[in-house]
């Protein structure tokens, strides 16, 4: 019985570590600035968990919401202009930048960018 309990505990610890190691890093590159400017992105200089390993300064156009999601094996993005009428998506999992959906007025927001990002190819399916 002790061996079964010990095996269960070790399995739980191992699976928890795998989930943490494979957790995707998500973030906001641009939050609809009123004028063009610099965006932000998480860089993994140790090259262990994320796709982006070299530091760079993304540029944001005025009124653009852009969000990303990355793991070591993929990067995907969603974007929308609060002054426009469409959201866009793209990924390294075989998905070029593509028009995703229409939006109008206040629906062209960060939520539309997140929806576009999340509609890209499932990055773990290859």
Image (spheres, helix red, strand yellow):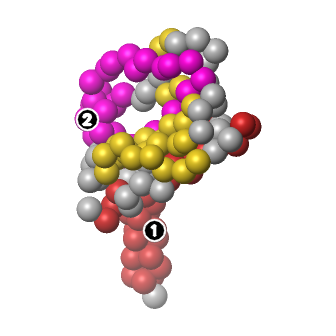
Q: Residue 69: tell me if it is visible.
A: no
What are the residue bounds of the magenta stretch? 43-71
Q: Report the mark closest to the observer, 1 or 2.
A: 2
Q: Secondary structure at mark 1?
A: helix
Separation of residues labelled 1 and 2 (CA atoms):
26 Å
Tell me the residue that label 2 is attached to: 47
Neighbours of disc 1 within 10 Å: few (<14), some (14-19), many (20+)? few
Compared across the picture, whether 50 is left or right of 23 comes to left
Tell me the residue that label 1 is attached to: 12
Residue 8 position, x and y percent, is 44, 76
**For the point 64% across and 15% down, which residue is it?**
34
Is residue 85 or residue 41 the one in the foreground?
85
**For the point 63% across and 31% down, which residue is it?**
82
Magenta-span inclusion, residue 105: no
Residue 26 position, x and y percent, is 49, 41
Q: Secondary structure at mark 2?
A: loop
State whether the magenta stretch is mostly helix, strand or loop: loop
């Amino acid at each position: 019985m002790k061996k079964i309990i010990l095996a269960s505990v070790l399995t739980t610890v191992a699976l928890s570590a795998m989930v943490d190691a494979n957790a995707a890093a998500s973030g906001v590159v641009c939050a609809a600035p009123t004028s063009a400017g610099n965006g932000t992105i998480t860089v993994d200089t140790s090259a262990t968990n994320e796709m982006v390993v070299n530091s760079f300064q993304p540029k944001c156009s005025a009124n653009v919401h852009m969000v990303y999601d990355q793991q070591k094996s993929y990067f995907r993005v969603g974007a929308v202009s609060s002054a426009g009428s469409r959201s866009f998506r793209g990924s390294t999992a075989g998905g070029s930048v593509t028009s995703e959906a229409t939006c109008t007025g206040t629906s062209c927001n960060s939520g539309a960018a997140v929806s576009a990002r999340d509609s890209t190819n499932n990055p773990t399916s290859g």
